[in-house]
Image (tube, coloured by chain):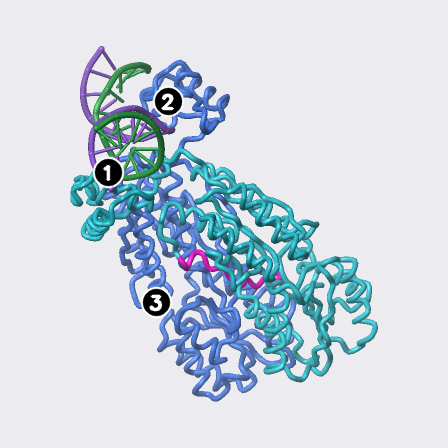
Chain colours: A cyan, B blue, C purple, D green
Amino acid sequence: MNELSNRATLSDVAREAGVSMATVDRVLNKRPGVHARTVGRVTDAVQRLNYRPDPAAARLARQRTHRVCFLLPSGSNSFVAMLREQIADNRPWMEDHRIAAQAFDVDALEPQVLARRILELGATLVAGDTAVVMGMDHPRVRAAIDELVATGVGVITLVSDVPSSRRHAFVGIDNVAAGRTAATLTGRFCGARKGGEVGLIVGSMALRDHAERSFGFNQVMAAEHASVRILTPVEGRDDARRTERLAAELLAEHPRLVAIYSAGAGNRGIAAALEDSGRANEVVFVGHELTPDARRDLLSGTMDAVINQDAGHEVRSALRLALSRLTQEPVHADQERIRIDIYLKDNLP
Amino acid sequence: MNELSNRATLSDVAREAGVSMATVDRVLNKRPGVHARTVGRVTDAVQRLNYRPDPAAARLARQRTHRVCFLLPSGSNSFVAMLREQIADNRPWMEDHRIAAQAFDVDALEPQVLARRILELGATLVAGDTAVVMGMDHPRVRAAIDELVATGVGVITLVSDVPSSRRHAFVGIDNVAAGRTAATLTGRFCGARKGGEVGLIVGSMALRDHAERSFGFNQVMAAEHASVRILTPVEGRDDARRTERLAAELLAEHPRLVAIYSAGAGNRGIAAALEDSGRANEVVFVGHELTPDARRDLLSGTMDAVINQDAGHEVRSALRLALSRLTQEPVHADQERIRIDIYLKDNLP
DNA sequence: ATGAAAGCGCTAACAA
DNA sequence: TTGTTAGCGCTTTCAT
């Protein structure tokens, strides 16, 4: 125990256990080739001295740079673009921590394509590396994830979870709660104008996050704002042209439409339809993800509220989780919980 | 330049500049006693090699543990209690980064007392240490802060800024925007019930954050919800007994009261008065800070929305900023921006 | 199965 | 004013 800080070091543990530093290192990092008896001695010493490895020293001594690969949906979705930007922005931090990130495109709407890409990617990764996957919940995908995990690669699901898999962590929000939040905002913002219909536009009901949001939305609308009728959900495939057409149809067919909730992407299309109809200010419009377009539409009053998950927070969280598997640094659960942000025109960052 | 990572090191810079590592270290850390000509050579070499110090190595070599002292208002305010908890929770992280935090109590409502404590504290700190101050904006306080800064101690204001001072950073939210946000929520939640009055309870108008919130609230109410009349603000001194009495009076005197906005603390008192009056569900109640009480009142429906600043985020942010002054690690502005969180019963963490 | 020893990139004490 | 050098607490060969 050195006298400047009373923190135990590797060599303290080694002395206490009566072995060499190399052996302690082997035990701590679960490297093979140590007698069970020795393992016991070392772990005992660790307990007794309340030893915690110094991450800075470890990082300094570690030679290899670990890889963190993000598998993101291809296409022009602006939220995904924000994730890409955040990955780039965190390069200096990663360099300081001896990890390197790469982002790959996949057609995330095709489960078999995604599953194949996961496995291809996995083949290039070694134990200690991490794959961060954003894609749909499907048996093939689940199987691919489990296969990766078995090889010692870390797997983190992002934004949309694959809960039945053996992934190490999910970084994203509780989408049912997000849908409920959207419902409360929608219902209360409608205020006096109750008694009409509310339109529900999703990307695809096959996407877990969209389905969960719709579910939460329906729950709260039915329970607490029963005077407005929820129309059958329509699928906009996260495409602005398509959502614009769908929104225009909703507006045309329902003169008493009081609100639109968009659980997926393509919100610019909906905003455009709303503006064209001249009813942008009387129809409440709530959607997800604070993209540059959403920002503008919030300020113009076309959108009334945006439910957001912070892309920067998600990327940093995924990186910290990936790192913590290497360094065994404790993760601060509190800090890694992604919040369901609500943005109005007044609290934009 | 070593061949594993192509990142330049201190000794690369030393060679490039034709000086020793110690000299480069002196220049980088702005230590005195280096010829101007030499400084030039070194900074040039740093530029050419695009050198960035390795924070892990620096941290490992640094002997001294730097101090970060929090000066927090005494009393039983639960938000302040949350800050204290977060400081404690981050101890392991701090230890890993060779910094140590202490929290001190001050009577923050007495500017001269606060100013004196700042100076007393400053006397125990040395250059490189940091003081984190939460207190009122007052000339005496400003002067004390400036004096500390002059001695090389870092100063960060927390929650309530002292903008005219030389403090290195402010960690907290834009309170005018927070007040505006509260107004939009209040106004829109009132919905059909317009035409009544809204009560405004603050802790003290002498507190910068409370005054700013009121200001923002008034702005938006007047501009966008002119049909409800804002009553003259009353001061609850952040004390639940007092706010309860004030709220009860508001309710008694204004049968058409449609909402209460509380810009300060003591929200439990207001909730109690609301519940006693039997009008908890018809009067919209918006307040600040997601304390355990606020959580309960949100779930019970007595509170309709809570505007929050994340105590954990604020503490971590203050710590990272304190550290970055030592390590010159770049600060990720994005990550340090404290958000104006909106919580409804549905998106509670 | 275990140990010895050479760094990793900095800081700081001491020399010159 | 500048340089030399011994660590900081780990990881990682290479021996044994």
Q: Mark 1 sits on what residue?
A: A21
At label 2, which amino acid type do we have? Answer: Val
Against A162, residue B329 (above or below) is above
Which label number is shown at residue B77?
3
Between the residue at mark 1 and the residue at mark 2, the CA separation in whole angstroms equals 33 Å
Q: Residue at x 35, y 78 (%)?
A: B241
* Chain at numbered mark 1: A
- Horizontal side of residue A103 vs A154, given as left or right: right
Q: Total number of numbered labels? A: 3
* Chain at numbered mark 2: B
* Chain at numbered mark 3: B
Residue B144 visible here: no
Between the residue at mark 3 and the residue at mark 1, the CA separation in whole angstroms equals 49 Å
Q: Residue at x 45, y 25 (%)?
A: B8
Task: From the image, state whether disc 3 or disc 1 is nearer to you.
Answer: 1
At label 3, which amino acid type do we have? Answer: Asn
* Residue A259 in picture, x, y percent from top left: 71, 72
